[in-house]
Amino acid sequence: MSSSPPNRLGAARAPRAEAFARLFEAVHEGVYIGTIAPGGSLTFAANPHLKLMFGYGVETPQEDVRPFDTDRFLDAQARLAFIARLTRDGAVTDYLLRLRRADGSAMWVEVTAHADRSRGSREMRLEALMRDVSERRKLEDQARDLYHQLLQAEKLAALGQTISGVAHELNNPLATILTWAERLSQLPLDDSVRRGLQTIFSESERAARIVRNLLTFARKRHTTRAMIDLNQVVRETLALRAYEQRVTNIMIIEALASGLPQVFADPHQIQQVLLNLIINAEQAMLSAHGRGTLIVRTWHDVERESVVLEVNDDGPGVPEDVQPKIFDPFFTTKDVGKGTGLGLTVAYAILQEHGGRISLRSKPGTGASFFVELPTRAGNLKPAPAPPSKPAMPVGVGAQVLVVEDEAALAAAVADALTDAGFRVDRAGDGEEGLKLLGEKAYDLVICDLKMPRLDGTALYRAIAATAPSLARRVIFVTGDVVGTDAERFLEESGCRWLPKPFRLADLLRVAREVLA
């Protein structure tokens, strides 16, 4: 009689042990029981899912599955930190570790564990549940990248409208300065005055290039796109820098994949992006150690349906605190006078307009890699046909021209230049005044600003087209902002010739003669 209770207790334990055994085998979490110490680990039990997680076969002995050995950690310091946390708290919950599978590939693992440490021993008994969260981390990284891209796009969009307006206002005085400098340079002058005028002219053109860069990233521009071979663009761009690289001890390694699919892009804009990346890399390497190796790679990413271009240098790298700001407008790490902080911003805007992207990977001290991606999927856009070129023909003396421009100084400079070239010129300060003069006199040509108060160039053109269709074909627009969507559409629909401010007088006279020819 006295032996019956132990029998009932043993009978009760047997089904419970069997249930735990079935759970241990079937659960879709890695289950680990063993010991861990600074020098290594021992495994007492590892369930089938843990073996599967780490890439071991089902037949692998449990004691050979040691996920907490030193060589399983990508970072030895992370293992020490994990042991220190277990020593201090005795347990961890959803502790994130970067571990290696049996084949050496990396994965992210969340560990929830309890540890018991024997007194006087550095070894701890560890019971842990482990979960492979590599896919979740990948999605989180992609979501973070997308967030940063959207943040950057919003930042550029917010600046775009302001900068477009500022650029338009800058172009007017720049056009006036360039026009007067060009006119004065045609007069008989002594050498010192001529040098001063040349300085004014060159510095004004430099300012105009900066304004054009502002407009490039602020809004979309007219581009000429075609199916291009990216490798060919790379070779042509590297050829432009070959001499400079040779004399500065920059070695180039080309790793251009054969058989790349063509991409629909503006080759000049892609070359602008590549030149900026190459020159930045050269400057970084030369400043760091006076020489360097530049690696330019291309490959086809079939999964992302893109062609990828990598520009890799062995310079000092980009500090982590600088990387989030690297594509911001006006941000530069260069000395004053050596950079405008617009190069990478313009590159970002160009690639965004092409449906591509640019990204950076860099660790301080190990160089930097910029990745340019362009989609390979065919688009619906077709490159705009180039306007037919006509030979410049001299216009007869006495042709009547109306200059409609709200910037008085620029209007005066243009009118004087046209007068010197043999035109008879009238001026109007806005579209309403221009419309009045058109009703009083017949004109052979109208040169008109696109943006003006009261009545703008678009409305003036439509009034001319309604009353004098033949004159509407002889309207030339000058504008400091050609990048707005409405302006682009209007200029394309009208078919009118136009010049971006600031322009050269020679170009204005050439276009005027072509329109009148």
Image (cartoon, rainbow, N blue to C red):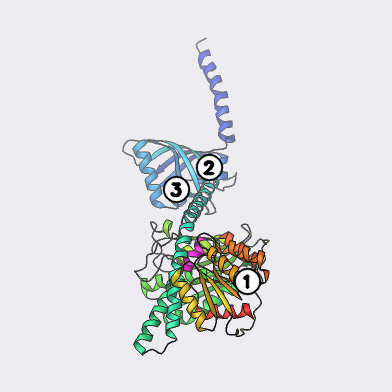
Asked whether 119 falls inside the magenta stretch, the response is no
* Residue highlighted by disc 1: 229
**On the rendered structure, is 495 left or right of 4?**
right
In this rendering, the label closer to the viewer, 3 or 1: 1
Residue at the far top in the pictured view:
1
Residue 70 lies, in percent from the top left, at 43, 50
Expressed as whole percent of the image width and height from the top left, the position of residue 77 reads 38, 51
Q: Which residues are magenta?
A: 211-230
| Image quadrant in which you'd find residue 59 | top right
Q: What residue is rendered at 57% in x and 27% in y?
A: 19
Q: Which residue is mark 3?
A: 69
What amino acid type should be assigned to the residue bearing mark 1? Answer: Asp
Q: Is residue 122 above or below residue 332?
A: above
Badge 1, how many Cα within 10 Å: few under 14, some, many 20+?
some
Whether residue 369 is visible, yes or no, is no
| Residue 509, above or below 327 | below
Labelled pair 2, 3 in contact (Cβ < 8 Å): no
Q: Is residue 226 magenta?
A: yes
In front here: 423 or 478? 423
Give the CA distance from mark 2 to mark 3.
14 Å
Mark 3: which secondary structure?
loop
Residue, disc 2:
62
Q: Earlier in the sequence, mark 2 or mark 3?
A: 2
Q: Amino acid at mark 3?
A: Asp
**Mark 2, secondary structure of its residue:** helix
Circle 1: element type:
loop
The front one of 362 and 186 is: 186
The picture places residue 516, in percent across and down from the top left corner, at 63, 79
CB within 8 Å, label 2 to label 1? no
The circle drawn on residue 276 is: none
Q: Earlier in the sequence, mark 2 or mark 1?
A: 2
